[in-house]
Image (cartoon, grey):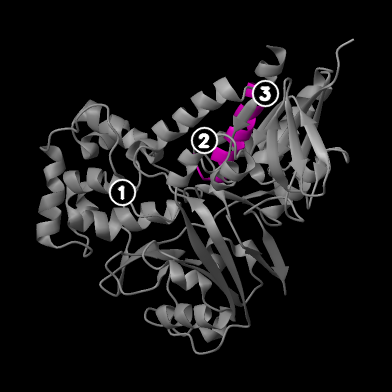
Amino acid sequence: MNETKKIVIVGGGITGLTAAYYLQKEIKENNLPYEVKLVEASDRLGGKIKTVRQDGYTIERGPDSFLSRKQPAVKLAEELGMIDQLVRNGIGQSYILVNNKLHKMPKGAFMGIPVQLRPFLFSGIFSPKGKLRAGFDFVIPKSKKGSDQSLGGFFRRRFGNELVENLIEPLLSGIYAGNIDDMSLKATFPNFYQLEQEHKSLIKGLQKTTPKKKKSTGKKPGMFFSFINGFESMINTLENTLDDSVVSKNTAVDHVEKKGHGYHLLLSNGEVSIADAIVMATPHYTLPKMFSQYDMFNEFHNIPATSVANVALAFDQSAIKKDIDGTGFVVSRNSDFRITACTWTHKKWPQSTPEGKALLRCYVGRPTDQSVVDLSDEEITEIVLNDLNKTMNITQKPEFSVITRWQNAMPQYTVGHKERIAKVREKASRELPGLFLAGSSYEGIGVPDCIGQGEQAVADVLEYLRG
């Protein structure tokens, strides 16, 4: 009879939880002689996914949604029997703040790149010179093949500074909370590189490859999904599907030692856990300490991580004298605002807010303004209200605010990221067989990307153990 093989998952964010869920499922359905354990250093699971319910409001401290076209998250919701709890975002006008004025986001743009030229040409966001320079995309030769480059450098070469700083940068750096002049094109948007290589022009490439919109009489549905009872309901459902013996909270891994066969994990409670395979689903910067005798993880010191804070402010609707018809705005890099974006959550996610109330969620912590995250709640709230009142007229103090700081939470995929990760993985597969890395530090920071990496880790572990 086969001896039971032990799999340890380190980290109970969405990546580790997904890995635990799919491993348990495989073990039960196929009667495999494996045992899975998940260890989490904090007192809760879910990582950055965290929902607050207060006075009838549903407030997300971390991610509030995922793109509906991204299959791993939809598939997991289906697996958990939660499809009927998914809600799409309310749609409405979004804005961009340029030169201290809110402008409507030009229609027919993809990630800030004009696919339809007419709305772009009539937009007040760009000067005539900026519009002319953006048109150079049609004639500028494609990049040299092969090597990585920064997102900012790539877009500036094709479109000039104005389009980049007033439209592309606020949209893209909002996703990664980073500086696009440091971010890797290949690790973040390799599709743009492919389009340029194939079509010599990004605009032409997008025009040819973007599906033509079918004429419809009704409103098109929102592109994002969330859960009616908040994003954390997915975490709770996942946790409830796991057997009681699987999860250990308040348990950190202090050190990992490779033995003749498998691994010993020295835990913070003084115990030693034995593993035949390990899924590391913790941030990259935790690995050099856990594997201190292996220099391959020192490469991770070259992956920076930025801090951000989000500020949810609850108001009575009567407090907002000058309301804006839309779902939110992003802020141009050239602005003197300290907030980077604001979502009018009561319009984007109506189910989150009681009738007659307003919920605004703002973000601070751009790469050049990291110290703002360390300010007190009062100071951050004052900064946010001061910025909001430049575009809206808010006459009352918020009923309450919920401020969430995420320190070193946003891994930065800087130029050369893919090569760095491949190098570490290649070395690890030789020196530490049975060790697999997954999570937001590696191949995508969004929730669906993390779920996909959790699934991939399961496939890798099973292949290794069957080996």
Alpha carbons under labels 1 and 3: distance apart: 41 Å
Q: Are marks 2 and 3 in contact (CB under 8 Å)?
A: no
Could you tell which of marks 2 and 3 lies nearer the N-terminus? 2
Alpha carbons under labels 2 and 3: distance apart: 23 Å
Estimate how packed mark 2 is, as few (under 14), some (14 to 19) or many (20 or more) residues with alpha carbons within 10 Å: few
Q: Is residue 280 left or right of residue 6?
A: left
Residue range of the region highlighted in magenta in the rendering: 444-460
**Residue at the spot of label 3:** 461
Which SS class for mark 3? Answer: helix
Direction bottom: furthest residue: 395
- In the rendered image, the quadrant that contains the C terminus is top right
State the predominant SS element of the stretch in magenta.
helix
**Residue at the spot of label 2:** 295
Number of numbered discs overlaid on the protein picture:
3
Which SS class for mark 1? Answer: strand
Alpha carbons under labels 1 and 2: distance apart: 45 Å
Front residue of 25 and 459: 459
Q: Look at 61% across and 39% down and name the residue there.
A: 73
Estimate how packed mark 1 is, as few (under 14), some (14 to 19) or many (20 or more) residues with alpha carbons within 10 Å: some
Residue type, mark 2 in image? Asp
Q: Is residue 106 shown to the viewer in this render?
A: no
Residue type, mark 3 in image? Val
Q: Look at 68% across and 44% down and name the residue there.
A: 11
Residue type, mark 1 in image? Ala
Direction front: furthest residue: 293
Could you tell which of marks 1 and 2 lies nearer the N-terminus? 1
Q: Which mark is residue 109?
A: 1
Percent of width and height locating residue 273 = 80, 35
Q: Is residue 69 left or right of residue 257?
A: left
Q: Is residue 263 above or below residue 401?
A: above
- In the rendered image, the quadrant that contains the N terminus is top right
Which SS class for mark 2? Answer: helix
